[in-house]
Amino acid sequence: MAQLSPALKQATPVQAARGEGVHLIDTQGRRYLDFTAGIGVTSTGHCHPRVVAAAQEQVATLIHGQYTTVMHEPLLRLAERLGDVLPAGLDSVFFANSGSEAVEASVRLARQATGRPLVVAFEGGFHGRTMGAAALTSSGAKIRAGMGPLMGGVEFAPFPYAFRYGWSEEETVAFCLRELDRLLVTAAPAADVAAFLVEPVLGEGGYVPAPQAFLTGLRERADALGVLLIADEVQTGFGRTGRFWGHQHTAGLTPDVLVTAKGLASGFPLSGIAASSELMAKAWPGSQGGTYGGNAVACAAALATLDVIEDEGLVANAAEQGVRLLEGLRKVAADHPGIADVRGLGLMVGNEFCTTDGAPDPAAAGRAQGAAAELGLLLLTCGPYANVVRMIPALIVTPGQVDEAVGLWAEAVRSAGR
């Protein structure tokens, strides 16, 4: 009898039987408030009726039309529909299955378009687990350990994680940009750099928003040096941060390539990259493709997801409920010194646990996360030391559900501290 790999580590003991909105129900009928959303995937909640209906209708019509063999209507409609939400000028899209694939497609495009070999990524970034994506990832040793040598041509620059450095945001940004400038005249000569790859908010790296001045600094340097700016919006996209795209918190910023996945199709595997037609045309013939990319059912689900986000005002709701969640969590932290920082954008909020001397405290974070699950609130940890407990509910979350989660979290933190 076969069984799941023991390398798969479960964050909670829950065996889900079904999902409804922001809730998961286990095989015993117990209902849990799910503030994991499948790691930011079920953007419209579990089994939103309109997404379910769209998928059911598509399953009965065409399940798979391989898109380098034939075109199909959901694929073409989704490409056109994304034009309504993509940044101006990013009018050409390529679809894949996972965030890792999309990230690698963005790097392949950047290298082919510029003729340059190097990519600069940033410390704490998570870009995937496949060999190329893992080479670009530094959110935690587990992603890279035991599988080297990884893809070459990658250099890392500091990310402005002000809490970690113990400086003001302004000081941290200035330091990180200086270090980037130094990297560009040392290990990553600017003339050899194809792209800067950055998350608008560090995901697995600890839920750290990139300051606007930092992203502006990257854009300025990219323009001056002929480097492409790639925004990895796998976790921050589709309304998660209270803007449709995370980079939109920085006024006037447009990336050259945008990577999307997770919330794109409310749980169906679908990812993609977007760039200008001019840039996308520089990809070499045959360099983009894949058996399952742009799957018809996933595309139908993505179209329904876009409709739900628009019709139900979910981007605005993410912004509003994100403020409510952040305020509630900061009140909890004020009574518990072990929570040293609470930060985030929209419905992407992290609680960082530290010891009294400021060292990361993954044990306390793990106890609080486990206690929350026992109380009926599902959460995940992140950060290089796993000392950040993150909250990423579906964008449909209500004020009452936010308050319920904050109350359960307060109880979990008290219980874990005893």
Image (spheres, helix red, strand yellow):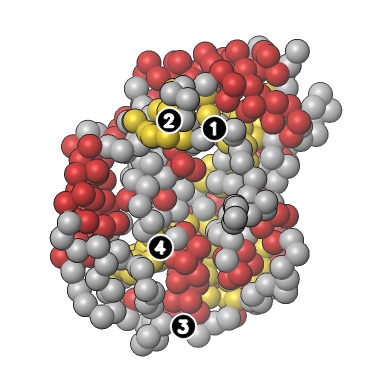
Q: Which residue matches tag 4?
A: 97
Q: Which residue matches tag 1?
A: 14
Could you say which is closer to the camera, residue 47 or residue 321?
47
At x 57%, y 40%, the residue is: 207
Asked if the residue at tag 4 contacts the one at tag 2, i.e. Cβ–Cβ closer than 8 Å, the answer is no
At x 42%, y 34%, the residue is: 17
- Disc nearer the start of the sequence (1/3): 1
Secondary element at image label 3: helix
Q: Residue furthest right?
A: 357
Asked if the residue at tag 2 contacts the one at tag 3, i.e. Cβ–Cβ closer than 8 Å, the answer is no
Q: CA distance from mark 2 to mark 4?
A: 24 Å
Quadrant of the image containing the N terminus = bottom right
Would you identify the image quadrant in which residue 385 lies?
Answer: top right
Residue 321 shows in this picture: yes
Residue flagged by tag 3: what amino acid is it?
Answer: Gln
Q: Position of residue 19 (x, y in %)?
A: 37, 33
Residue flagged by tag 1: what amino acid is it?
Answer: Val
- Disc nearer the start of the sequence (3/4): 4
Q: CA distance from mark 3 to mark 2?
A: 44 Å
Secondary element at image label 4: loop
Could you say which is closer to the camera, residue 279 or residue 236?
236
Residue flagged by tag 4: what amino acid is it?
Answer: Asn
Q: Position of residue 100 (x, y in %)?
A: 50, 63
Disc on res. 24: 2
